[in-house]
Amino acid sequence: MNIMDVIRLRRSIKPESMKADPVARDLLDQLFEAANWAPSHGRTEPWRFVVFTDDARLDLARVLASAEVGSSPVSETDPTYLKLRQKMTNAPVVIAIICAPSPNPKIEPHEELASVAMAVQNMHLCARALGLGGFWSSGKKAFHPAVASFLEVAPPAHCLGFFYVGWPAIPWPKGERGSVTHKVTWRNRTELSI
């Protein structure tokens, strides 16, 4: 598959549409290697990842549910926990996305966020090339201090959400985009008159 095909065919596949089948470690390592080649102003490489598989996903579901409902520990029968537990166990791999910004004052915070987003895009494109589905999810709970503590992330580092990875249980979705011609403005140089 050439790069333009991979880009055009990348889709978000929600965890509910993934099989529970495991994803081999060597495939996940390819995703992280792709992420590691994202652009990074000042070569800060601010992306960090925490990988959850097997029963560790249940621990993450508990923490996220507690953050969402404002109660710790959350009950095993709490509807928020049950919903998150189902989401977490549908996808065989859940990856916490962390931005660990550089202390260098020359590096703007938005540049670090952009670098992490590009790293995740690289992972998503690599996943597509391998036939894997991916889905980036965030929401208020991802930014909760209890979630940061659970992930062992201390400010100024912060969680940007979670990337779910798994084999699609559905036919690959078709995508649509509006024409790029309405999104690009061309300016040609003209002589300035003073």
Image: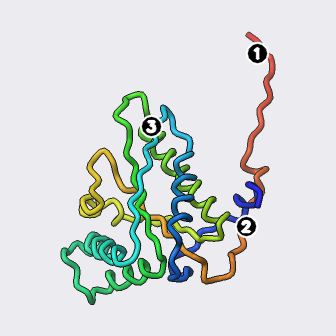
| Colour mapping | rainbow
The residue under label 1 is which amino acid type? Leu
In the image, residue 80 above or below residue 111: below
Q: Position of residue 62 (x, y in %)?
A: 28, 76
> Residue 44, which numbered label?
3
Going from N to C along the chain, the mark reached first, 1 or 3, is 3
From the image, state whether disc 1 or disc 2 is nearer to you: 2
Q: Which residue is depicted at the point 30% across and 74% down?
A: 59
Q: Name the residue under label 2.
A: 176
Q: Which amino acid does label 3 sit on?
A: Thr
97 lies left or right of 35: left
**Residue at 24% over, 59% down:** 149
Q: In which quarter of the image is the N terminus?
A: bottom right
Question: Most extreme residue toward the top, as rendered?
Answer: 194
Q: Which image quadrant is residue 143 in?
A: bottom left
* Upstream in sequence: badge 1 or badge 2: 2
**Residue located at (38% from left, 41% from top):** 101
Tell which of 184 and 112 is nearer to you: 112
Q: Are marks 2 and 3 in contact (CB under 8 Å)?
A: no
Give the structural element (helix, strand or loop) at label 1: loop
CA separation, marks 2 and 3?
Answer: 35 Å
Q: Which of 62 and 34 is in front in this view?
A: 34
Say if 118 sits above or below 194 in the image: below
- From the top left corner, tell me how far across and down residue 115 is, in percent: 51, 45
Which residue is labeled 1 in the image?
A: 192
